[in-house]
Image (spheres, coloured by chain):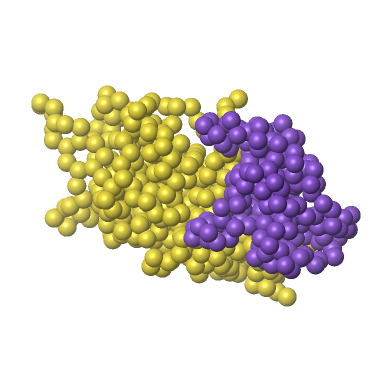
Chain colours: A yellow, B purple
């Protein structure tokens, strides 16, 4: 059996990055995710796997270092928390526009502005609706445990390279700061140059004699060429929406009311399900694991079964819009959540369900 | 079996590390565990608290507003968390600096004068382990050998020579914890 460790979510991200053979991490410290870079610095993987770990001068520098590394076909990542991720939006749209794979971790804190360092889930819109300019999407994974913080690093890299698109791990201060048991994978080697050459023929690895020049760019001055490129991007997104939806159903079989929640709110809702069922309310939950692509079909199916859905998120109501779009008016969909750095309790969630959907 | 615990006191009392050692002890005993700290500015000299859950089953919410056991190490934390102990639950507190003692009649209450005992042992740093000992005496959910393993896992190697002293502190805590109100039913 492999070793079980007790670790913070942030520490698990760092350990998993080293073990899955990431080539580079570039970041700038910000609470509540600073343990990611702290752990990487303490582990000093440049001595073992050769992974580069660099504290950049800013978040803007970090994301542009990611652009450079990704362009070379390297597996590179950065992490930050909400205000820092806002600074990275230009870089993200350029990465998407240049079809470069990378992983970005956002351990969300309360906003807007500098906000608070306490947990929040109010960056949903920024993550799945754009954030930067142009018609692009970020593949978005939402871990709900420390184990998933570790596991999703490799999942995110695999998806990013499969589709040549940036992937976001959208976490929050609860999952980042809490400790749970975690089982880490075996150490995998970093990709060799031969591997990159063979599998990622777009990567700029140095022009060989007689080979065509490879250009990585997001600029197309001809509007017709840019339109064509956008069609290509959209086709890629339709493929992602078809093939890559991940979700978890909890106690849905006999559910009459459904919580829709991700990340730490999904954990809180699991407890709320227990409390609700103790009161005789048949509650269940759909937990989107990918926020983009969103589990639209699964929600449509469940809309035929349940009497109402409550989107529980630590925001003023963001994901609830996607739940409503999926359900398309068939049943009532309401939102509940504390926000601005406050975290709802399981009993508050049950009260909200009773007040907003069951009526009382 | 599921035990939901809040440990609360001043920053610097070893609240978070006590929680970590308890959680690691649970890991060593094949339990599911979670450790959720208050983090940020309040840790630096203000109040610090951590929620620890030990369970035989998958843990749902790491965030709770009701606890089976509250381990309370200062007046502010007592004022805040006494009301959040479940009826029939347990409250353990250090009497040092407490002027308004717990008053609920529907919970079990224990007192452990760990600050005083740590001073007697001339080792203020073992304070949190004395408290942990008191807790383990009342709620022997993890075996002492697993607590020692948990200590080893939690402490960096360079501090492993301190383990016997910490073990002594745990035993001392088991010896000095006093029952104030017990066998209360919800």
Q: Residue at x 79, y 47 (%)?
A: B176
Q: How many marks?
A: 0
* Above/below status of A278 relative to A203: below
* Residue A239 seen in render: no
Where is residue B83? Give x, y as percent.
73, 66
Q: Residue at x 38, y 39 (%)?
A: A41
Name the foreground residue: A330 vs A335.
A335
In-image side of A149 versus B180 (left or right): left
Name the foreground residue: B13 vs A265.
B13
Where is residue A109? Give x, y as percent.
46, 60
Where is residue A60? Give x, y as percent.
27, 54
Q: Where does the C terminus of chain B fall, quadrant-wise?
A: bottom right
* Above/below status of A201 relative to A325: above
* Above/below status of A52 relative to A176: above
Q: Where does the N terminus of chain B fall, quadrant-wise?
A: top right
Where is residue A295? Give x, y as percent.
51, 53
In-image side of A222 versus B69 (left or right): left
In which quarter of the view is residue B155 placed? top right
Q: Residue furthest bottom?
A: A360
């Amino acid at each position: 059996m492999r070793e079980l460790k007790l670790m913070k979510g942030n520490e698990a991200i760092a350990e998993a990055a080293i073990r899955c053979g990431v080539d580079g991490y570039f970041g700038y410290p910000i609470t509540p995710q600073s343990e990611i870079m702290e752990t990487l610095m303490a582990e000093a993987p440049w001595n073992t796997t050769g992974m580069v770990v660099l504290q950049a001068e800013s978040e803007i520098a970090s994301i542009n270092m990611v652009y450079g590394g990704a362009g070379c076909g390297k597996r590179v990542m950065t992490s930050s928390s909400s205000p820092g991720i806002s600074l990275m939006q230009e870089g993200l749209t350029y990465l998407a526009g240049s079809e470069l794979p990378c992983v970005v971790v956002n351990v969300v804190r309360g906003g807007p502005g500098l906000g608070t360092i306490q947990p929040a889930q109010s960056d949903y819109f920024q993550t799945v609706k754009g954030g930067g300019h142009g018609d692009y999407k970020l593949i978005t994974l939402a871990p709900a445990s420390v184990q998933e913080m570790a596991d999703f690093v490799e999942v995110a890299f695999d998806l990013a390279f499969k589709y040549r698109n940036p992937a976001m791990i959208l976490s929050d201060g609860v999952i980042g700061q809490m400790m749970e048991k975690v089982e880490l994978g075996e150490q995998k080697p970093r990709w060799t140059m031969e591997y990159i050459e063979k599998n990622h023929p777009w990567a700029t690895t140095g022009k060989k004699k007689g080979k065509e020049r490879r250009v990585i760019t997001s600029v197309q001055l001809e509007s017709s060429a840019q339109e064509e490129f956008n069609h290509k991007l959209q086709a890629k997104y339709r493929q992602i929406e078809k093939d890559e939806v991940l979700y978890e159903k909890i106690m849905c079989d006999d559910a009459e009311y459904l919580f829709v929640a991700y990340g730490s709110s999904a954990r809180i809702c699991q407890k709320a399900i227990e409390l609700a069922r103790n009161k005789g309310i048949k509650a269940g939950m759909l937990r989107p694991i990918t926020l983009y692509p969103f589990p639209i079909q699964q929600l449509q199916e469940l809309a035929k079964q349940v009497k109402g859905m409550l989107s529980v998120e630590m925001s003023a109501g963001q994901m609830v819009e996607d739940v409503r779009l999926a359900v398309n008016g068939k049943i009532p969909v309401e939102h509940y959540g504390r926000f601005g750095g406050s975290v709802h309790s399981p009993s508050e969630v049950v009260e909200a369900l009773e007040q907003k959907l069951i009526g009382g | 079996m599921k035990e939901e615990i809040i440990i609360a006191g001043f920053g610097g009392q070893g609240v978070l590390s006590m929680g970590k050692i308890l959680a690691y002890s649970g890991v060593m005993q094949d339990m599911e565990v979670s450790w959720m700290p208050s983090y940020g500015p309040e840790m630096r000299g203000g109040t610090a608290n951590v929620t620890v859950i030990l369970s035989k089953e998958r843990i749902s919410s790491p965030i709770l507003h009701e606890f089976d056991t509250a381990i309370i190490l200062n007046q502010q934390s007592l004022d805040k968390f006494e009301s959040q102990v479940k009826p029939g639950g347990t409250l353990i507190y250090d009497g040092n600096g407490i002027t308004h003692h717990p008053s609920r009649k529907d919970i079990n209450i224990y007192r452990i004068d760990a600050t005083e005992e740590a001073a007697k042992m001339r080792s203020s740093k073992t304070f949190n382990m004395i408290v942990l000992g008191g807790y383990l005496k009342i709620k022997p959910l993890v075996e002492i050998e697993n607590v020692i393993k948990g200590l080893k896992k939690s402490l960096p190697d360079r501090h492993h020579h301190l383990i016997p002293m910490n073990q002594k502190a745990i035993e001392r805590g088991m010896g000095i914890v006093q029952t104030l109100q017990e066998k209360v039913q919800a």
